[in-house]
Image: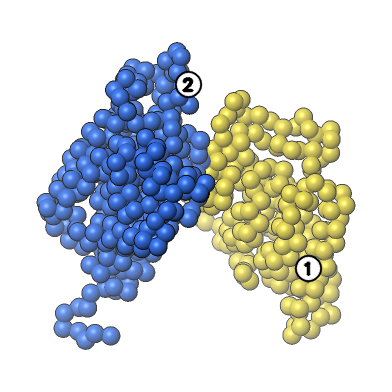
Chain colours: A yellow, B blue
Amino acid sequence: MSEYQKIIKDGMWVNNVAFVQLLGLCPLLAVTNTVVNAIGLGLATTLTLVATNIIVSMIRNVVRPEIRIPVFVLIIASVVTAIELAMNAWFHELYKILGIFIPLIVTNCSIIARAESFASRNSVGHSFVDGLFMGLGFTVVLILLGAMREGLGFGTLLSQAHLMFGETARGLTIVLFDDYKGFLLAILPPGAFIGLGLLIALKNIIDKRMAARRPTPVPITEVSESLA
Amino acid sequence: MIKSSPHIHPHGNITRVMLNVCLALVPGIIAHIYFFGLGLIINMAIAIITALLTEAWILKLRKHPIQPSLLDGSALLTAMLIALTLPPMVPWWIPFIGTAFAMVFAKHLYGGLGQNPFNPAMVGFAVLLIAFPQEMTRWTSPAFNDASLLSFVELVRYSFSGVLPTGLSYDALTMATPLDTMKIQTSLGESVSAIQSTQKVMGEVAGFGWEWINLMFLVGGLYLIIRGIIGWQIPAAMLLGLFLISLITSLIAPDSYASPLFHLFGGATMLGAFFIATDPVTASTTPRGRLIYGFSIGLLIYIIRSWGGYPDAIAFAVLLMNMAVPTIDYYTQPRVFGHDGK
């Protein structure tokens, strides 16, 4: 397995930000009530991770270790501000729905965790791939949880898709059940906690089955430190 | 460190306790059916079947022996309590979802009987109330005369297909409960005494029908205390808490706060005091802790009923105090004999 493959697998599965590190739970639980919200926040977070990872990796040999944390914070804050302004300009409706959670990406522990534990010790190329796939892993979980909650709660998928993909996407909305009464609990905060718990349980079951199939378990070589 | 939850079962086994509790529910159930019709029977049947099937399924998944756990009566009791909290006329999937959720999420995901921190029946009810507010807050009117109740066949057809007998609309069959009426009318500036004398639904002291149902649950509860199946501390402390705070507020502002009698015999107070708050798994286990636990539930019920968003509050009060049980138990552990005090 090449280094890049390992980084990709780490981000998407073995050290998935949401499933394994359990970082960034606040936005994860708060904005996953629809798939479109989940995609929007997931992509914004991914973009932030990629940009901050690249910048941190580029300056890693210049910044003295004593002041590295304040420098990381400054970089992350600037990147998030830029992304917030960009979303306000191009996805204004979605920006209004996601509201406070876009500026709050700055507090998502996974971002500073990747800066500190990966980007500040690895090359720009590796850091770019790590940021991209850590972000995509997070996004996939957001979308899964969003789909579960929207499907159960409203009986639809991808409602209000035009907020993300423009007017032509209005037809993307899938109605799962006609005349569905709605299971409000799934939309409300308890639904997020229960849903995430079930998804993590599912991942653990899959891991166990896969480990049982293999004769020798694959050692987990890198355990990321969480700064949460 | 002492392990929490019941250490000694004072009387026989779980089955005997559970079945005695079910037996003690019977007078209240009869009163409920007398005033609100046979809908309760349908809900209870659906809830019991769901509870037993889900329990059997989960036990099989967890590779536990099915028969002993299924026959211990705990699933039966949870199902009966959920059915008793539901409005008499609801679609079949309401008791189904509530009971299944209670068994799977509130009971077995925490490790099964004896391990669950939250009262399963109240979790089921709270989930239903939050997820289906429309269905869960429409109570059929009590039987002011016998003709106003639907027949069993009509009720079964309504439960499974949503069809009402011709000429009847759902709105004609339902009305605000006494607790609802009290809450709405006092917020409109009506005085308590005027509401109680003019509204037929208010009955004599605590709501037409409701006062009798509560009385019957009180009788069943006293039977449980006399048989030594539940302790007196939780029900007494809970009723005392509710009594004291309602006495104080009704003395200060008799026009806007109902009398203690209204609160003690209204809503689900007696069911909550004797059958729900006393659940041996989720209640506090120390003698002093039980008093604190019960008293706090009584206060919380009054606070939510009077100033909260919901008309009744047994479920939320019990669930909130369930969360506090580990702390209460920690600080009220009896001193071990032979050791000094703190």
Q: Are marks 2 and 1 on the same chain?
A: no
Dot 2 falls on a residue whose secondary structure is: loop
Q: Which mark is residue A76?
A: 1
Query: Label 2: which residue?
Result: B169
Q: Residue at x 76, y 83 (%)?
A: A67
Crowdedness near tag 1: few (<14), some (14–19) or many (≥20) residues, C-alpha within 10 Å: many
Q: Chain of mark 1?
A: A
Q: Callout 1, which amino acid?
A: Ile
Q: Residue at x 77, y 73 (%)?
A: A72
Inter-mark Cα distance, 2 to 1: 60 Å
Crowdedness near tag 2: few (<14), some (14–19) or many (≥20) residues, C-alpha within 10 Å: few
Q: Residue at x 24, y 85 (%)?
A: B341
Image x and y of residue A194, in percent: 51, 49
Q: Dividing the image into 4 quarters, which one contains the N terminus of chain B?
A: bottom left
Residue B73 visible in image: no
Residue B24 visible in image: yes
In front of the other: B251 or A25:
B251
**Pair 2/1: label in front:** 2
In front of the other: B68 or B19:
B19
